[in-house]
Structures are given as C-alpha cells and as structure tokens.
Image: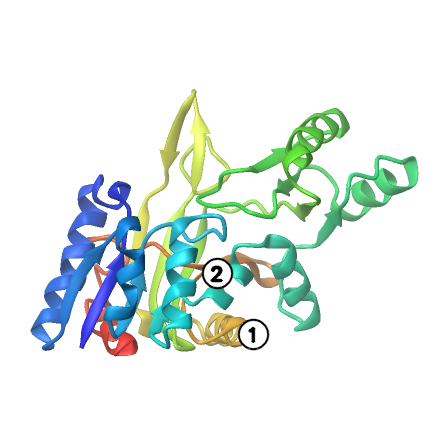
C-alpha cells in the first residue's frame, strides 16, 4: 500500500523527531509498503495514496486538518481522523466528555467572561487557589496558565478570553510527573512518565525566561496499572479508535485525567525506548 505522511518543515528540526519519522518510513518499507513525506503543496495529490498519517500539528485551523479532511473525503484510512482532531483540540468539548462519561478528572468550570461577584465567588469556592486557566485550543502547554490569586485570575483571563469565546478553569494538582499513555485502536501503545522540570509546574515550563522540558521516563506498557489502563481505554473509546496520548495525574484519590490529545509525541529514544514495536503497530493500523 501507498502511505503518505503529512509533515511540515519543523517536524525535521529536532533529531529525535526526525529519527522517529525515518523509523516510520523504514518500518513501512520493510513491511512492503511505500511511505512518502508529503507537505502542504501535496494536499491535492492525497487521493493518490491509500492511507494518510498526520504528524504535523493538527489544530482545525492548520493545514494538517485540511489534509485529514481531504483524506477522509477520498475514502482513505487516516490517522489522525478529522473527528478525533476536532474533539481533542477543543478543551471545552473534552470538559463535556469527561462530565458525561464519568471520567475521573480535576474539578473544572467553563468560564464565559462573567466577572460578577456571584460568578467569581463560585469559581474561587469550587477550585480554590492556585488553579489553571486553559484556552480551548492549546498545544504543548501553550495558553495554559496557573493563577495564584484573584488579581492574577482577572488579568490573565481577560487577556486569554480576547481570542476565545470561553476558557476552561481547572483545579491545580501538584505532581512531579504526568503519566503519558499512548493509545492506538483503544489498546495501550506505550507508557511514559513526563516529568515536571525543577522549578516548573507543567511538563513544558518557563523557568528564568527559558522554556524547559521535563525528562521523559519510558516504562513497559505491560507495567501499566489496571485502574489507569481502564480509565484511558474508556476515554479513548469516547473519542474514537485513532492514535491518542492521554495525560493523567496520580493522586491520593486515584487517577485524574488532564486531557486526551490526538497526534501524540513519538520521539526516537523516548516514547519508543521500551516498546519498540510501536512503529509497526501504527503502520499496521494504517493499512
């Protein structure tokens, strides 16, 4: 079969991501398939492929989403599919999915810009301080801020809501790491700990004016706790049967899902360090 892998130039900037992309290509070819890297200008030719694998950032406003739509409309197998992109890219939609499907997650509130005393009182009583503000569309911890007091909330929320109809306000849960659970076709694909860098509060933190990523600690997917596995598979089934990455906090009260992402990170020497068959599994899912 002929597989097209939609990418942007930035996907090749880092050695680990570049090496992972080349592993996808060599794996597909070893399985008897062709594997071409395709770019924006190749979108009209998507119909000439049998399957499309999206690796560029997939927000609905980006070209990767257009490529996904073209592939779906042409009847091709596509990862990530447009439905998964729309769901995972919108934190407000995820808020509703968590609530309606009893997914354990931090307390959260949808905020529409109501700064009345009653509204603010309810927010601060429910979430306490600190808590987290998220724009509906976020990637790699961007447009995600922690507020420590009332004045910070008003300042930051007014800045963020200028470009959004609403914000997601979420209980802050302190931890040294997030569980990252890779899911493919509603089965566990890989398991990692994404560590919080020292002096930061999220996986990608700004420390002394610099963006710092925490370490990635890979763990065999067979070691996943039964409770964590069940929660992650239940949530992935609410979204679809694609390729997802779930971020989960481990607390004294059990696991709390922060979010589910389409187009999860897969970097050479990180997510693939233990379960090295993830490339073959993804190619098999495509074909």
Residue hosting label 1:
238
Residue farthest to the top, as pictured:
208
**Closer to the camera in the image, 278 or 171:** 278
Residue 209 is situated, as x and y percent measured from the top left of the image, at 43, 20
Q: Residues within 10 Å of mark 1 (few under 14, many from 20)?
A: some
Residue 72 is situated, as x and y percent measured from the top left of the image, at 41, 71
Looking at the rendered structure, the number of numbered marks drawn on it comes to 2
The reply to whether callout 2 and callout 1 are in contact (CB within 8 Å) is: no
Task: Residue at 39% x, 64% y: name it.
Answer: 70
Residue hosting label 2:
85
**Closer to the camera in the image, 120 or 24:** 24
Q: Is residue 154 left or right of residue 163?
A: right
Q: Is residue 18 above or below residue 246?
A: above
Residue farthest to the front, as pictured:
44
Task: Residue at 42% x, 71% y: name it.
Answer: 73
Q: Nearer the viewer, mark 2 or mark 1?
A: 2
Mark 2 secondary-structure assignment: helix
**Which quadrant of the figure has residue 118?**
top right
Residue 109 is situated, as x and y percent measured from the top left of the image, at 74, 51
Q: Is residue 244 above or below residue 133?
A: below
Rounded to the nearest angstrom, the CA distance separating label 2 from label 1 is 13 Å
């Amino acid at each position: 079969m002929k597989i097209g892998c939609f990418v942007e130039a930035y996907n090749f900037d880092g050695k680990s991501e570049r090496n992972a992309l080349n592993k996808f290509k060599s794996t597909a070819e070893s399985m008897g398939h062709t594997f071409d890297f395709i770019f924006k200008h190749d979108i009209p030719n998507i119909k000439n492929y049998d399957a499309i694998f999206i690796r560029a950032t997939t927000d609905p406003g980006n070209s990767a989403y257009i490529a996904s739509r073209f592939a779906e409309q042409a009847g091709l197998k596509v990862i990530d599919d447009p439905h998964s992109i729309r769901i995972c890219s919108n934190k407000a939609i995820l808020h509703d999915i968590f609530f309606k499907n009893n997914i354990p997650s931090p307390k959260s509130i949808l905020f529409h810009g109501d700064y009345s005393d009653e509204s603010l009182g309810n927010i601060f009583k429910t979430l306490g301080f600190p808590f987290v503000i998220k724009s509906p569309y976020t990637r790699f911890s961007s447009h995600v801020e922690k507020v420590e007091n009332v004045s910070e909330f008003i300042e930051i929320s007014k800045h963020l809501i200028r470009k959004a109809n609403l914000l997601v306000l979420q209980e802050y849960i302190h931890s040294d790491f997030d569980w990252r659970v890779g899911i493919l076709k509603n089965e566990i694909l890989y398991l990692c700990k994404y560590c919080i860098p020292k002096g930061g509060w999220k996986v990608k933190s700004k420390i002394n004016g610099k963006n710092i990523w925490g370490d990635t600690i890979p763990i065999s997917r067979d070691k996943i706790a039964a409770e964590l596995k069940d929660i992650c598979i239940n949530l992935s089934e609410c979204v679809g049967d694609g390729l997802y990455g779930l971020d989960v906090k481990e607390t004294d009260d059990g696991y709390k899902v922060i979010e589910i992402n389409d187009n999860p990170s897969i970097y050479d020497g990180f997510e693939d360090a233990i379960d090295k068959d993830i490339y073959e599994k993804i190619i098999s899912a495509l074909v």
